[in-house]
Image (spheres, rainbow, N blue to C red):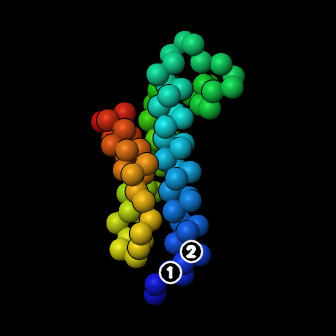
Amino acid sequence: MSRTAEEIAQAHKACLDGADTINVVITTHAKGSDTTDADFGHDMTHDEKKARVERSVGYLKYQKALTDWGSESFTVIDKAITDADAFTG
Protein backbone atom coordinates (compact mmCIF):
# COMPACT_ATOMS: atom_id res chain seq x y z
CA MET A 1 0.00 0.00 0.00
CA SER A 2 1.48 3.32 -0.99
CA ARG A 3 1.06 6.54 0.94
CA THR A 4 -0.88 9.50 -0.35
CA ALA A 5 0.85 12.82 -1.00
CA GLU A 6 -0.77 14.14 2.17
CA GLU A 7 0.51 11.19 4.23
CA ILE A 8 4.01 11.69 2.82
CA ALA A 9 3.89 15.41 3.66
CA GLN A 10 2.73 14.66 7.20
CA ALA A 11 5.43 12.02 7.67
CA HIS A 12 8.09 14.42 6.35
CA LYS A 13 6.91 17.09 8.81
CA ALA A 14 7.12 14.52 11.62
CA CYS A 15 10.68 13.73 10.53
CA LEU A 16 11.59 17.42 10.58
CA ASP A 17 10.06 17.67 14.07
CA GLY A 18 12.15 14.65 15.14
CA ALA A 19 15.27 16.29 13.72
CA ASP A 20 14.43 19.42 15.67
CA THR A 21 14.05 17.41 18.88
CA ILE A 22 17.47 15.84 18.32
CA ASN A 23 19.07 19.23 17.64
CA VAL A 24 17.49 20.87 20.68
CA VAL A 25 18.45 18.06 23.08
CA ILE A 26 22.05 18.04 21.83
CA THR A 27 22.22 21.85 22.05
CA THR A 28 20.85 21.79 25.60
CA HIS A 29 23.41 19.16 26.58
CA ALA A 30 26.23 21.22 25.09
CA LYS A 31 25.26 24.16 27.31
CA GLY A 32 26.17 22.11 30.36
CA SER A 33 25.59 24.04 33.57
CA ASP A 34 24.50 27.10 31.57
CA THR A 35 21.10 25.57 30.80
CA THR A 36 17.96 27.29 32.01
CA ASP A 37 14.37 26.23 32.54
CA ALA A 38 13.68 27.47 29.01
CA ASP A 39 15.99 24.81 27.49
CA PHE A 40 14.18 21.65 26.44
CA GLY A 41 15.53 18.71 28.42
CA HIS A 42 17.40 20.89 30.91
CA ASP A 43 16.25 18.61 33.73
CA MET A 44 17.22 15.37 31.99
CA THR A 45 20.31 13.34 32.84
CA HIS A 46 22.84 12.59 30.11
CA ASP A 47 21.45 9.04 29.84
CA GLU A 48 17.90 10.39 29.52
CA LYS A 49 19.02 12.78 26.78
CA LYS A 50 20.73 9.92 24.94
CA ALA A 51 17.58 7.80 25.22
CA ARG A 52 15.44 10.64 23.86
CA VAL A 53 17.81 11.17 20.94
CA GLU A 54 17.97 7.41 20.26
CA ARG A 55 14.17 7.20 20.05
CA SER A 56 14.01 10.14 17.67
CA VAL A 57 16.82 8.93 15.43
CA GLY A 58 15.31 5.46 15.29
CA TYR A 59 12.11 6.97 13.90
CA LEU A 60 14.06 9.05 11.37
CA LYS A 61 16.02 6.03 10.15
CA TYR A 62 12.85 3.95 9.83
CA GLN A 63 11.06 6.67 7.87
CA LYS A 64 14.06 7.42 5.66
CA ALA A 65 14.22 3.77 4.59
CA LEU A 66 10.80 4.08 2.95
CA THR A 67 11.06 4.43 -0.80
CA ASP A 68 8.10 6.62 -1.75
CA TRP A 69 9.37 10.03 -0.65
CA GLY A 70 9.49 11.60 -4.09
CA SER A 71 11.26 14.96 -4.01
CA GLU A 72 11.17 15.62 -0.24
CA SER A 73 14.46 17.04 1.03
CA PHE A 74 16.37 15.08 3.66
CA THR A 75 19.26 17.50 4.19
CA VAL A 76 18.17 18.55 7.70
CA ILE A 77 17.10 15.00 8.58
CA ASP A 78 20.39 13.48 7.39
CA LYS A 79 22.38 15.96 9.49
CA ALA A 80 20.23 15.18 12.54
CA ILE A 81 20.85 11.46 12.02
CA THR A 82 24.62 12.03 11.80
CA ASP A 83 24.60 14.27 14.88
CA ALA A 84 22.42 11.82 16.83
CA ASP A 85 24.70 8.91 16.00
CA ALA A 86 27.71 10.91 17.21
CA PHE A 87 25.89 11.97 20.40
CA THR A 88 24.72 8.47 21.30
CA GLY A 89 27.73 6.55 20.02
Q: In which quarter of the image is the C terminus?
A: top left
The residue drawn where x is 33% and y is 43% is 82
Q: Mark 1 points at which residue?
A: 3
Against 19, is 35 above or below? above
Please name the amino acid that badge 2 sits on. Glu
Mark 2 crowdedness (10 Å alpha carbons): few <14, some 14-19, many ≥20? few
Nearer-the-camera pick, 44 or 85: 85
Q: Residue 72's image quarter?
A: bottom left
Against 80, is 89 above or below? above
Disc 2, SS:
helix
- Looking at the image, can residue 72 be seen? yes
Q: Position of residue 14 (x, y in %)?
A: 56, 58
Name, please, the residue furthest toward the right: 37
Q: Position of residue 84 (x, y in %)?
A: 38, 40
Mark 1 crowdedness (10 Å alpha carbons): few <14, some 14-19, many ≥20? few
- Looking at the image, can residue 48 be seen? no
Q: Where is residue 80 in the image (x, y as percent from the top left)?
A: 41, 44
Q: Do the residues labelled 2 and 1 touch (CB within 8 Å)?
A: yes
Please name the amino acid that badge 1 sits on. Arg
Q: Residue 7 carries which label?
A: 2
Nearer-the-camera pick, 22 or 47: 22
User: Label 2 to label 1, Cα distance in Å?
Assistant: 6 Å
